[in-house]
Amino acid sequence: MNSSKKLLVGAALGVFGAAALSGCSPASGTAALVNGVAIPDSRVTAFSEGCSAVLQDTQLAQSPNQLRSQMVTWAVLDEMSRQKAAQMDDPPTDTQLRDYVEQAGLNILLTDDRCAEAARGVARHDLIALGLGANTEPYFGGYTVELNPRYGSWDATNLDVSGSGSLSEIANS
């Protein structure tokens, strides 16, 4: 093998090795895995852009980038609640989800389809947790969540993203 090929192969192996050590998701464009189910970055982007759009004229205005970490959390809670709802005999209905968001005084979140999807996911999560009462451990503890390291790590105790995230740090799951 000539020296330029050796250099190219060495550089490629270095990149792939660094990616493996940093805990990158197995597929490019994946924000998180919940029990092996991928949450694409595109969903987090849609949630961020949609919620930023509905909040732009309020005191809560934030850019999509400022909302991104929170939207990763919402996307994970959405996926957790979808998986749990699929196991339930009587999961929360779309009407119950909408009513829950409206009763919380957050109707504005329902005015953009992208943000509404995120809000319904959090509402589904909340309604499932409320329905379980004190017996939430099987629900909350029954999920393996792996975040793309650029978002930080998943705090299973607080059901939230922790840390600032970095591609130079090993991801915690």
Image (cartoon, grey):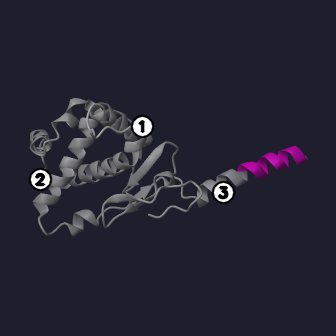
Give the structural element (helix, strand or loop) at label 3: helix
Front label number (2 vs 1): 1
Magenta span includes 4: yes
Counting from the top left corner in percent of width and height, residue 61 is at 31, 37
The circle drawn on residue 42 is: 1
Q: Nearer the viewer, residue 86 or 57?
A: 57
Task: Give neighbour class at mark 3: few <14, some 14-19, many 20+ (Cα, 10 Å).
Answer: few
Span colored in magenta: 3-12
Q: In this image, 147 relative to 106: left or right?
A: right
Residue topped by disc 3 = 17
For the C terminus, the quadrant is bottom left
- Cβ atoms under marks 3 and 1 closer than 8 Å: no
Please tell me how crowded label 1 is: few (under 14), some (14-19), or many (20+) other residues with Cα within 10 Å: few
Measured Cα–Cα span from mark 2 to mark 1? 31 Å
Label 2 Cα neighbours within 10 Å, binned few <14 / some 14-19 / many ≥20? few
Separation of disc 3 and disc 2 at Cα?
Answer: 45 Å
Q: Earlier in the sequence, mark 3 or mark 1?
A: 3
What's the residue type where badge 2 is placed? Asp
Q: Which badge, 2 or 1, is on the more N-terminal residue?
A: 1
Image spot of residue 148 (x, y percent): 48, 52
Q: Nearer the viewer, residue 112 or 130?
A: 112
Give the mark nearer the N terminus: 3 vs 2: 3
Residue 109 image point, x, y percent: 22, 37
Q: Residue at x 26, y 64 (%)?
A: 140
Local secondary structure at mark 2: loop
Report whether 123 appears left or right of 69. Answer: left
Q: Amino acid at mark 1?
A: Ser
Which disc is residue 89 wearing? 2
Q: In the structure shown, which secondary structural element does the residue marked by tag 1 occupy?
A: helix
Q: Quadrant of residue 145?
A: bottom left
